[in-house]
Image (cartoon, rainbow, N blue to C red):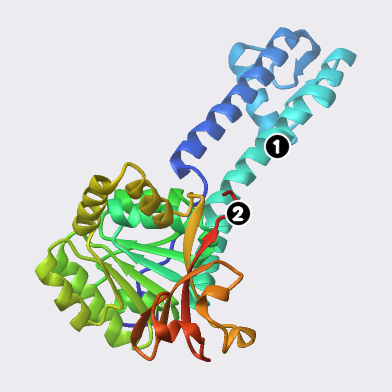
Amino acid sequence: MSQSSKPALTRRGAPSGWRTVVVRAMLALSLVVVAFLLLWFDRDGLKDNVDGNLSFTDVIYFTMITITTVGYGDIVPVSDRARMIDAFLITPIRLFVWLIFLGTAFNFLLKRSWETWRMKMIQKNLHDHIIIAGFGASGRKSLEELISAGVPVSRIVVIDCLAERVETAREMGAATIQGDASRDELLSSAHVERAATLLASAGRDDTSILIVLTARNLAPKLRIGVAIRIEDNESLARQAGADVVVNPVSFAGLLLASSSHGSHVADYIADLATSSGKVALRERGVDPAEVGQPLCDVTTGLGVRIFRDGAIIDAADAAARKLRAGDRLLEIVPTPDG
């Protein structure tokens, strides 16, 4: 597929174009009516150089000609008051009407062309961004959590087939592409090969797994997380290339089961899982100054786990007594609002 035919990136913009046109047209019409009333009630100060008779139709004609042009000279103001009305009331109305027309032209032609060009530039320069493939309940919650965690919304691209979901994501500030995220050309349009993370939650396990397969083929080093609802499909998602597999049903069951051990266990687990809680889980690389120290001496948070060469080392393990270069640490840290 050629570059010009790729799905276009969109982002939240101005209100509906037709709504704006109607509002502006009503405002312009109101100004014209005001101008007509001013000229009608002061029609004795006007002179018709054609037949000397100033009718209702003549005032309508003179109003429109005065608003849209400087006039033809067939009808002219002759009294001082009529000239003052034309200079200080009709002329500002003329300028406002022209500004309304020019603003509408700018909005429909120049501004939209500029916005289209700007979106193409943003799409072309996407880098280190987060792609949310599927914007159902899980996808929307992911976007809310990312924004709450401080991720700039300009770094997030949402992909979904349904127009209403795309519009919701756009209203939340994310860049959006409408279409099937399992297609090569659509993920290429989102520059998946330059993305930091892809979060797949299509609502159906087979579709989510297909998205993972497509993304992994296009971006071998991409970090991919996927929501899987049937436990038997979790291994398939990992085989497809997912780094993280989350089962919402299993997690809900875990929270329910943990409540049987105490009234606060589930609350703490939920607190860890959300960016709005008092504490949060953070994964980071070991600092050079920490090499050789035990995990329990980490001062940036409460160290709970080490990931070393594919192995998982808990805080109570003997191997946790000495951190090594290249270790990944998982720690519990307080949130800014905590």
Viewer-proximal residue among 111 and 156: 156
Most extreme residue toward the left, as rendered?
232
Q: Is residue 87 left or right of residue 177?
A: right
Q: What element carries label 1?
A: loop
Q: Residue 69 carries which label?
A: 1
Residue at image x 17%, y 72%?
Answer: 234
1 or 2: tag closer to the N-terminus = 1
Image quadrant in which you'd find residue 239: bottom left
Neighbour tally class for label 1: few under 14, some 14-19, many 20 plus, Cα within 10 Å: few
- Report the number of discs: 2
Neighbour tally class for label 2: few under 14, some 14-19, many 20 plus, Cα within 10 Å: few
Above-or-below relation of 35 to 209? above
Residue 47, position as x, y percentages in the image: 77, 16
Label 1 and label 2: CA atoms lie apart by: 62 Å
Residue 31, position as x, y percentages in the image: 64, 24
Query: In this figure, which residue is indicated by the disc labeled 2?
Result: 336
